[in-house]
Image (tube, rainbow, N blue to C red):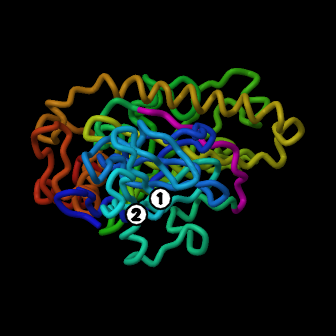
Amino acid sequence: MTGRFWPIDDRLRHWHPVVPEDRLTGKPMAIQCCGVPIVLFRNGGEGIAAIYNRCAHRRMPLSHGTVGPQGVTCPYHGCRFSADGTGYCPTTRSNRFRIPVFETKVLHDIVWVRSGDAARTVSHDLAADTGLHPDLAEGDHVFVAAIAKDIEAPLQLVVDNMTELEHTGTVHKQLAFGIDDYETVETRCRHDDDSVTIFYRGRQRSLPFYLSLLMGLRRGDVYVQTASVSFTPPCASYQIHWTAGPGGSTRAFGMRFVNYYTEVSAERTSLFSFVYWKIAGTWMQAIPNLARPLFCRLVSAELDRDKAIIEKMPRDQASLDWFQLSRFDGPLVATRKLMARHYAPTADVTPGGCDLEPAAIAPATAGDPRL
């Protein structure tokens, strides 16, 4: 159900994480996803409902209303809308309305939404085939927490930062490389029509004693990261492990992050980081209930540093034409190309202009200084 009255484009055919479930109360809750206004509410014993956050009568946001047995009641004229998007106005009961409906699911205590129209055309289902990144399953890594950050920046700038590692030496404090180690860092970037794969390997910076002890890492250990980035919807999986020096055995501790980047609006992005760890054979295994909050604070603090630096980036000079790139910027070029192809064919980083046309980036080739 799209068109002039209900401007919903195909970005919402995918599942997007939108809000931690514990933020929902008995009142309707306004959110945005891909620029679309949505109202969430608890639909009695039937779970969480999501409908378009505008009354069909006079476009009043339904999130200003109340939740009752019949769904959401608009505060302006009392129009009532049920979870299936149908509604009527008690002042003129013959007037029947319909507004778009969104599917909802809850995974790892996060509410996810997608277009109800998309559900009839896309085979993926969260309960069966999940329709989500396969690394959201536990496997040999155990789920630890979902950490959400609201970032006042366009989606493109968030993806630019979160899919490169060069800023780590200056912005971050704990994981990966220090600023003096980059000359020895090995990096590779490869992409096809669907995803970008990014590889980094280099010496882990010095860690505080308590982290080295808990994680079982030693001075001289090597940090190894492989990331896979795709845009149906925008998300990335980061597989991280350490080796005992170059070419040494793999340390027991390992991590995995699956980041979803939800475009709230043209100027705001929500980052949802689903965090996993592998702790068998480490001190963390002996004290998981103490190690878990410590580890989550570590990850959250690092994400806060990402948020702070991204929000400082200018919007008006964000196209590739402004950049003088280095060997670490292959992911920047490749991810922008795929985003233009799969997610936002006319991706904007400013409210009024197109930042990137698909033809603006040629495929990277061997010997390209960007890789």
Q: Are marks 1 and 2 in contact (CB under 8 Å)?
A: yes
Q: CA distance from mark 1 to mark 2?
A: 6 Å
Give the labeled residue for mark 1: 82
Range shown magenta: 139-150
Q: In the figure, 86 relative to 188: above or below?
A: below
Where residue 291 sits: x, y (%)? 78, 33
Where residue 29 sits: x, y (%)? 48, 40
- 10 Å crowding of disc 2: few (<14), some (14-19), many (20+): some
| In magenta segment, residue 145 | yes
Residue type at tag 1: Ser
Give the labeled residue for mark 2: 86
Q: Residue at horizontal 87%, vertical 35%? A: 287
Q: In the drawing, what numbered circle is on residue 242? A: none
Q: Residue at horizontal 39%, vertical 52%? A: 90
| In magenta segment, residue 1 | no
294 or 331, which is in the foreground? Answer: 294
Q: Quadrant of residue 328?
A: top left
Note whether residue 337 is visible.
yes
Residue type at tag 2: Thr
Which structural element holds mark 2?
strand
